[in-house]
Amino acid sequence: MLMKKRYILNYDDNQYGAVVAQDGAETMVQVDDGDMTPVNFRPVLNGKAISIRFGGRLHLIHLTNAGGNGSVQATIGGRPVSLTVMDELRAQALESLGDTVGSGTICADIPGLVVQIKVSKGQIVHKGEPVIVVEAMKMQNELLAAISGTVAEVPVSEGDSVNPGDPLVIIEPEPGV
Amino acid sequence: MATRKTGRKFDKVLVANRGEIAVRIIQGLREMGLGTVAVYSEVDRTALHVLMADEAVFIGPSPAAESYLVGDKILAAARETGAGAIHPGYGFLSENGPFSRQVEEAGLVFIGPTAESMEVMGDKLASRRKMRSSGVTVVPGTDEAVTDPEVAIGIAEGIGYPVLLKASAGGGGKGMRIVRKSGDMASALRQTMGEAGSAFGNDAIFVEKYIENPKHIEVQVLGDGQGNAIHLFERECSVQRRHQKVIEESPSPSLTPELREKICAAAVQTAAAIDYRGAGTVEFILAPNGEFYFLEMNTRLQVEHPVTEMVTGTDLVHAMVKIALGEGICYRQEDLRQQGWALEFRLYAEDPSRNFAPSIGRIESMTIPQGPGVRLDLGVYEGFDVPIHYDPMLAKLIVWGEDREQAIARSRRVLGEFTLHGPVHNLPFHQWALEQPAFIDGSYTTHFVEDEFDPADWLPELDAGQAEALVAATALFEALRRSGQATEEKNVDCAAGNWRRNALRSMTGNK
């Protein structure tokens, strides 16, 4: 039985396409425009790493899911890499929404405590302006507006505990701001 | 392990700390045949130091202010377990005079200096006055608090700009401001006093000369509390981010033998002047012209003590405990030598690309480097969740070589073998630092990270082979996850079962 899945991967500023195909016991992978080739790999460390032979080298790549949205943390050769991986359908759906959607939403990236909210609903903010302060591990981290626009919603209050992925401030892009 | 009665002043020690330093102290105590008691907060129930100790006592909720910083709870834990002494480690209660006094008043031994030593050295103005009167050179400036901009301008003109405004009660880089001309003085003074008042509850400010391009040199000392002190040479700690050290080394590449002798003598003089008891560190600023100035004394065991242990072949935890037992200083100055070179890399759960912001999460997997010249002081293990409540230091990697060149080459090898997967961490930062010309030739100053480090462009690029392998592996990982194969593996909770399954798979050649 032939199973074929196509994925879009992003890390740093690079985007790759990859196809994974399974034909009986054999697994094949195609990266970008390369050839579809049988791949020699094995899941190890209770499924938290993949040992893969590529270009004559044997790599041990540690992998974990970091929350939803297809974000994956990997470590290769001691270097940590954050990736997103999504199947082709999801990639196309996101693309059709346009790339400004979502970027106005400032989310917590580590668990912490909201110590100060610097903006309120309806306020106009500019890209780079500090909007909220979250304390984690004895450090106060100022989060900045990623885009200019109007504050549409602040779904948290000062004193709230937040978890990674929780939206903190939602900014609606506004032409001309 | 039952504590043996040995007729010593104490047979069991409570370690009032957590993480790698609690582990390191427990190791030292066990080697000396002493019983060990750990304390732990809610979130630290399964922490490494707790698992290692003979006994462990729960001391409250996760925030340090409700557990590790509560002296009464620590004392109650000591009473409950019959510990005769308390080792505070670093941070938390280690430099808290009232706590040290409370311990001694309870009839227990505090493994560290007296409250008086801590109080003199904890107040920057008091320590400046004390050192000046003992003949140790301090940075030119005032010994009295300043509140009037006109007075501050007068002082600054006397010693020459630039000057540094500093909170007397400050520390950790907070409450400091550089002033380069008279016009900036009034607003800078007002801001620094405001900061100091809110951060330390004390708005006393003093003015001192700002030394451009300084190096941070410190000297390890041991005192017997009777006015006798020795030194164990210097450490250089100029690689700092956010005014916190990340790489330390001993010896310092910046000292000539003459300068080393002078600076070490000044440190011994400092310790002797306050009848210092136990292990301490005297910190100096070294100016580019070779002048050095007393900065402060840290009245505790330092994070970076292992580099000293590696080059002098000593054990500072043993030495501290022997002093506390009343056996005096266990080394003679004339027997101490610096042999070879040691570098220490602090492993933090933090993201160098995002201004070194702390990170947390589970240590998913870890490959520990070994081989010649390697020491790892570790506070975590695979599967441990790095908590949000404390300092994000996970471990210290210490590498020894016959000389600096070999120590650097070996460090590159060792860092390349260290894989830690889970929270974002700074191992790649250390690899970056080891390739910088200013680090390699030893000319780096405390501005090294600020000047050389570009958060947007420092991570080594993956080579083409690695990038392809990464993409292929991630796609496979996702495909496996979606088909439920990886999940199936996770359901097997017996490690031996997995090992057998993996072994069988490799024997049958099953991919």
Image: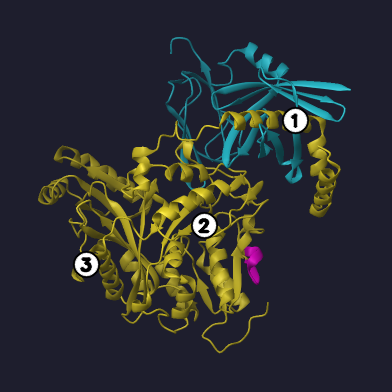
Report, in whole angstroms, how far the alpha carbon at label 3 lies from the one at label 1.
68 Å
Q: Nearest the camera: B398 or B177?
A: B398
The residue drawn where x is 64% and y is 81% is B3
Q: Which one is closest to the eye, mark 3 or mark 2?
A: 3
Residue B144 on image: x %, y %: 20, 59
Do tag 3 and tag 1 residues touch (Cβ < 8 Å)?
Answer: no
Is the residue B462 above or below the residue B93 in the image?
Answer: above
**What numbered label is drawn on residue B65?**
2
Q: What hue represents chain B?
A: yellow
Q: Which chain is cyan?
A: A
- Give whichever of A97, A83 is nearer the camera: A83
Residue position for label 1? A39
Which segment is the magenta one? B50-57
Q: Is residue B56 magenta?
A: yes
Q: Nearer the viewer, residue B71 or B128?
A: B128
Q: Quadrant of the N terminus of chain B?
A: bottom right
The answer to whether any part of residue B203 appears in the image is no
Whether labels 3 and 2 belong to a single chain: the reply is yes
Residue at image mark 3: B136
